């Protein structure tokens, strides 16, 4: 068994590194896009609110695997050169769009959770709408965003396993390749795969728990 562990470990570590790269880029791009969408839905008026709402519900209401197939298989079929994507960028784009829908709702909900009296008090002192949002609303809303973000990020990390269907050698696919070489050691190989996911996700979960304890009970009363 130990021979299989040592032979398999380099392949699994390569897969873990690929999972780390995909999830890190996805979290970064998805968070930036989601923050922008959440802000626009909050301050952009009803047309923007409902238009972006359609985007959010369309992506959240359909399986991520469908998004991946659309971006990797269907868009290249249009014949447009800049839509001819390799597997890695296709995975990043699909996961980032999916992540943005959850981040956007967290941002919108956190901003709306700040009592209106805070904004009214700031405006009464002569602050503009932008100044009020930047100096008063967002600092309080950020404290509410942090705890749920951790949970979303863990879901995205585990969700990277789906990109194996388009040939990316992330952790799960690396495990599958290892089982083909050592078909009698399924329990060992998949056990190692699970442990690596745990080693990656557990610190994120602990960070989210710490953030929830530190920021989750913050008072928003003026």
Image: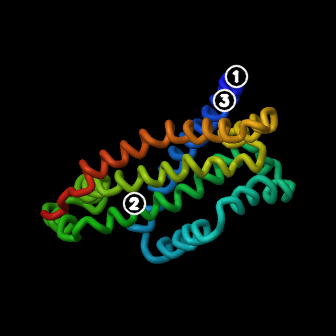
Question: Against 86, is 14 above or below?
Answer: above
Q: Mark 3 or mark 2: which comes first in sequence?
A: 3
User: The N terminus appears in which quarter of the rendering?
Assistant: top right
Tell whether label 2 touches label 3 (CB within 8 Å): no
Q: Mark 3 or mark 1: which comes first in sequence?
A: 1
Front in this rendered view, residue 12 or 107: 12
**Residue 191 occupies quadrant:** top right
- Expressed as whole percent of the image width and height from the top left, the position of residue 181 reads 81, 33
Residue with the mark numbered 2: 107
Residue 3's disc number = 1
172 left or right of 77? Answer: left
- Gap in angstroms between the C-alphas marked 3 and 2: 34 Å
Front in this rendered view, residue 214 or 25: 214
- Expressed as whole percent of the image width and height from the top left, the position of residue 14 reads 66, 29
Residue with the mark numbered 3: 14
Estimate how packed mark 3 is, as few (under 14), some (14 to 19) or many (20 or more) residues with alpha carbons within 10 Å.
Answer: some
Q: Secondary structure at mark 3?
A: helix
Question: Against 53, is 142 above or below?
Answer: above
101 left or right of 75? Answer: left
Nearer mark to the viewer, of 3 and 2: 3
Nearer mark to the viewer, of 1 and 2: 1
């Amino acid at each position: 068994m130990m021979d299989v562990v040592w032979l398999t470990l380099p392949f699994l570590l390569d897969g873990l590194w690929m999972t780390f790269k995909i999830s890190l880029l996805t979290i970064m791009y998805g968070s930036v896009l989601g923050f922008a969408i959440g802000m626009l839905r909050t301050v952009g008026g009803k047309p923007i609110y409902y238009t972006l709402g359609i985007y959010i519900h369309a992506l959240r209401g359909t399986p991520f695997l469908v998004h991946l197939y659309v971006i990797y298989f269907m868009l290249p079929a249009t014949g447009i050169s800049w839509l001819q994507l390799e597997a890695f960028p296709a995975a990043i784009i699909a996961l980032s769009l999916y992540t943005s829908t959850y981040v956007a709702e967290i941002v919108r909900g956190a901003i709306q959770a700040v009592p209106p009296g805070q904004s009214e008090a700031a405006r009464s002192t002569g602050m503009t709408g932008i100044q009020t949002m930047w100096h008063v609303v967002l600092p309080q809303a950020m404290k509410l965003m942090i705890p749920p973000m951790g949970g979303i990020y863990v879901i995205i990390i585990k969700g990277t396993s789906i990109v194996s269907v388009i040939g990316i050698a992330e952790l799960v696919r690396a495990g599958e390749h290892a089982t083909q070489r050592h078909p009698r050691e399924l329990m060992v190989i998949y056990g190692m795969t699970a442990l690596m996911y745990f080693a990656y996700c557990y610190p994120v979960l602990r960070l989210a728990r710490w953030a929830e304890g530190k920021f989750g009970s913050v008072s928003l009363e003026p």
